[in-house]
Image: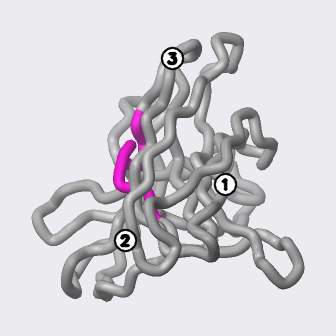
């Protein structure tokens, strides 16, 4: 999703709401400017693909500094296809919370070269604070994977990105990235 906004301190929230009114993913982001100066923003919402095409609602909004309610809501109806990305995380769900000093169990499915990829927990600025190589069960078809990430006890409370990606066999560059926001608290 991308757009323009003029929100208090450039903060806004984006989310995807499923056909049954369930929240598929929510992400708290910052625009390039705000508080009287319009800014731009862009971000991705990542969640497991549906089994069949599904109508969803994408929303962008501000949370009221007064009472936390949704204000300045913009909605767009879109249809998701059942196309499956090369890597996707099924658990934890987008926006899940994990405590410092605990572990984070990550499950999902992947169909990537040699069944291997990397799973990282990154700060908002993109710095990896936890990184682990992961293998899916098979390399010749989409298959399950499981990983346990150790969350450092000294990790500051805040929003982080849980990112899965493979590397290109041609040049080693990251590809097939799947990124969802989680909370450390």
The residue labelled by disc 3 is 102
The quadrant of the image that shows the N terminus is bottom right
Which of these two is toward me, 30 or 159?
A: 159
Taking 144 as reference, is 153 above or below it?
A: above
Which of these two is toward me, 109 or 115?
A: 115
Q: Looking at the image, is mark 1 or mark 3 nearer the viewer?
A: 1
Dot 2 or dot 1, earlier in sequence? 2
Taking 173 as reference, is 180 above or below it?
A: above
Residue 24, magenta (yes or no)? no
Q: Is residue 73 visible?
A: no
Taking 88 as reference, is 33 above or below it?
A: above
Q: Looking at the image, is mark 2 or mark 1 nearer the viewer?
A: 1
Mark 2 Cα-neighbour bin, 10 Å: few <14, some 14–19, many ≥20: some
Q: Tell me the CA gap for discs 3 and 2.
A: 32 Å
Q: Tell me the CA gap for discs 1 and 3.
A: 20 Å
Task: Give the percent coordinates (x, y) of residue 9.
Answer: 67, 43
What residue is drawn where x is 76% and y is 59%?
32
Q: Is residue 139 visible?
A: yes
Mark 3 Cα-neighbour bin, 10 Å: few <14, some 14–19, many ≥20: few
Task: Give the percent coordinates (x, y) of residue 142.
Answer: 41, 74
Q: Name the mark on residue 140.
A: none
Dot 3 or dot 2, earlier in sequence? 2
What residue is drawn where x is 70% and y is 35%?
130
Give the residues in magenta: 88-96
Left or right of 123 in this view: 162: left
Left or right of 134 in this view: 19: left
What residue is drawn where x is 72% and y is 65%?
39
Which type of secondary structure does the marked residue at label 1 adopt? strand
The residue labelled by disc 1 is 118
The residue labelled by disc 2 is 58
Which type of secondary structure does the marked residue at label 2 adopt? strand
Dot 1 or dot 3, earlier in sequence? 3
């Amino acid at each position: 999703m991308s757009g323009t906004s003029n929100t208090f301190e450039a903060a806004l929230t984006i989310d995807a709401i499923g056909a049954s009114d369930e929240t598929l993913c929510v992400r708290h982001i910052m625009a390039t400017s705000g508080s009287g100066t319009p800014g731009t923003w862009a971000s991705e919402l990542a969640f497991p693909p549906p089994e069949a095409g599904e109508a969803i609602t994408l929303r962008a909004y501000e949370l009221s500094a007064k009472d936390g309610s949704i204000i300045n809501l913009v909605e767009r109806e879109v249809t998701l296809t059942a196309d499956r990305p090369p890597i996707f995380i099924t658990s934890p769900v987008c926006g899940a919370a994990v405590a410092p000093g605990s572990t984070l169990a990550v499950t999902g499915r992947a169909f990537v070269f040699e069944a291997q990829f990397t799973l990282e927990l990154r700060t908002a600025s993109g710095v990896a604070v936890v990184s682990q190589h992961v293998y899916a069960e098979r390399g010749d078809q989409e298959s399950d994977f499981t990983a346990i990430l150790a969350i450092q006890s000294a990790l500051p409370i805040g929003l982080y990105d849980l990112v899965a990606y493979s590397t290109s066999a041609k040049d080693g560059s990251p590809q097939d990235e799947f990124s969802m926001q989680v909370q450390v608290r």
